[in-house]
Image (tube, rainbow, N blue to C red):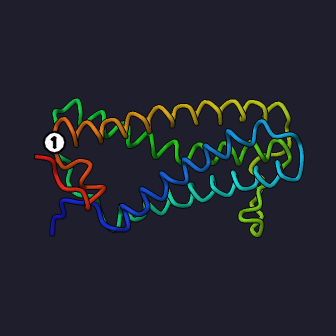
Amino acid sequence: MCRSVYSLAAVLLHWLTAALILAAAGIGLYMVDLDFSPAKLRTYSWHKWVGITILLLTALRLAWRQLAPPPPPLALPRWQARLAASVHLALYVLLFAIPVSGWLMSSALGVSVVYLGMVPLPDLVGKDEALGEQLEQLHWILNRALLVLVILHAAAALKHHFVDRDAALVRMLPFLHPRT
């Protein structure tokens, strides 16, 4: 049976990932200006936990897409379909690359990642302060790229809903009604 909306699992994974991206960004912006203290270390841990959770959810989302493929694409002009596919691919790449770059950075700075305070994750590289600083810059750049793509993604969804009046946004928010 061909569905016109995403499955409930896909919708929940999408919006949970979106909420966690906002949480990670908020925590990340907050933590950088904290003075060194137990509170700062705790906040860094929370940021890492959210990042690793995003990594895991992204892997789960891709696995789910294999089990329950998304609805067929909307009929769009070729350039819009290509742009949408490119943005989606870039979003998935960043949802892997950003947590991995943070994990690599922590490893290089000699600060182990212990997921949820219970599961020690292996260091991905040896301690190397210079590499850690480079990875910090990479993490920053990748996060800015994600911000740009998330804004573009959200703007496109709103344009489809309010200007084009098609079902693009309704497919991810089935409780909405198509605008006619």
Res 163 → quadrant = top left
User: Image point 52% across, 47% down: which residue?
Assistant: 95
Please state which of residues 155 and 179 is positioned toward the viewer in this rendering. 179
Image quadrant in which the N terminus is located: bottom left
Q: Along the line of sight, which residue is nearer the eye, 153 or 177? A: 177
**Position of 21 compared to 4: left or right?**
right
Asked which quadrant contains residue 165, the reply is top left
Residue 45 appears at what percent x and percent y? 75, 55
Up/down of 121 relative to 33, above or below? below
Left or right: residue 15 compared with residue 75: right
Element carrying mark 1: loop
Q: Is 139 located above or below residue 19 in the figure? A: above
Residue at figure coordinates x 78%, y 31% from the top left: 133
Residue drawn at 79 percent across, 47 percent down: 107
Residue bearing the label numbered 1: 165
In the rendered image, residue 166, in percent from the top left (x then y), is placed at 16, 45
Are there few (<14), some (14-19), or many (20+) residues within 10 Å of tag 1? some
Q: Amino acid at mark 1?
A: Arg
Q: Is residue 56 left or right of residue 29?
A: left
Residue 113 location in percent, x, y? 77, 56
